[in-house]
Amino acid sequence: MHVKYLLDTHTWIWWNMNPQKLSQRVQDIIGNTSMYDEILLSAISPWEFSKLLEKQRLGISCAPEDWISTALDMPKLRLVALSPVLSYRSTVLPQPFHQDPADQIIVATAREENATILTKDEKILSYDHVRSLW
């Protein structure tokens, strides 16, 4: 069985900036590479990170490109491109699901990749059509 986890944007940011904000369970999973075959990150997550910087909701002490490059350098991490098919599938998720486009893309990516989302987001955790945990 191929075990894959997809990091929600905040999970990826916190792992690289403030890992104590993650649940112990998520810290244990990400920190133990023998627990999975791949860690996935949607291509939308670096964009969301950049929007947080733009809106000054997040601060860093280095060049954003350097932060992103370093944060992408995780063992077994694969950045999942936003393909045309994923773009479409993010718009036709089983309802009800909320209207946040980035979350729709992340959920569609997890469904397409058969991955479990590591997230604190209650809207994703309570969504029946994707596996998630915190």
Image (cartoon, grey):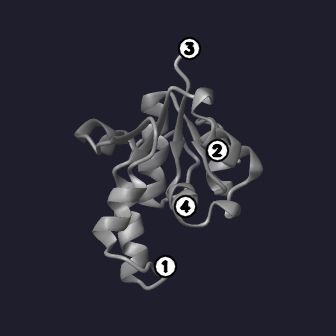
Q: Which residue is mark 3?
A: 1
Instruction: Identify which amino acid the numbered label 4 is placed on.
Output: His
Choose between 90 and 61: the one closer to the eye: 61
Instruction: Identify which amino acid the numbered label 3 is placed on.
Output: Met
Q: Earlier in the sequence, mark 4 or mark 2?
A: 4
In contact (CB < 8 Å): disc 4 and disc 2: no
What is the C-alpha distance between the residues marked 4 and 2? 18 Å
Q: Which residue is mark 2?
A: 127
Q: Nearer the viewer, mark 1 or mark 2?
A: 1
Q: Which mark is residue 10?
A: 4
Instruction: Identify which amino acid the numbered label 1 is placed on.
Output: Leu
From the viewer's perspective, is 117 left or right of 41? right
Q: Quadrant of the N terminus?
A: top right
Q: Residues within 10 Å of mark 1 (few under 14, many from 20)?
A: few
Q: Which residue is mark 1?
A: 58
Instruction: State the residue at coordinates (51%, 62%).
Output: 13
What is the C-alpha distance between the residues marked 3 and 2? 24 Å
Q: Residues within 10 Å of mark 3 (few under 14, many from 20)?
A: few
Instruction: State the residue at coordinates (31%, 45%).
Output: 87
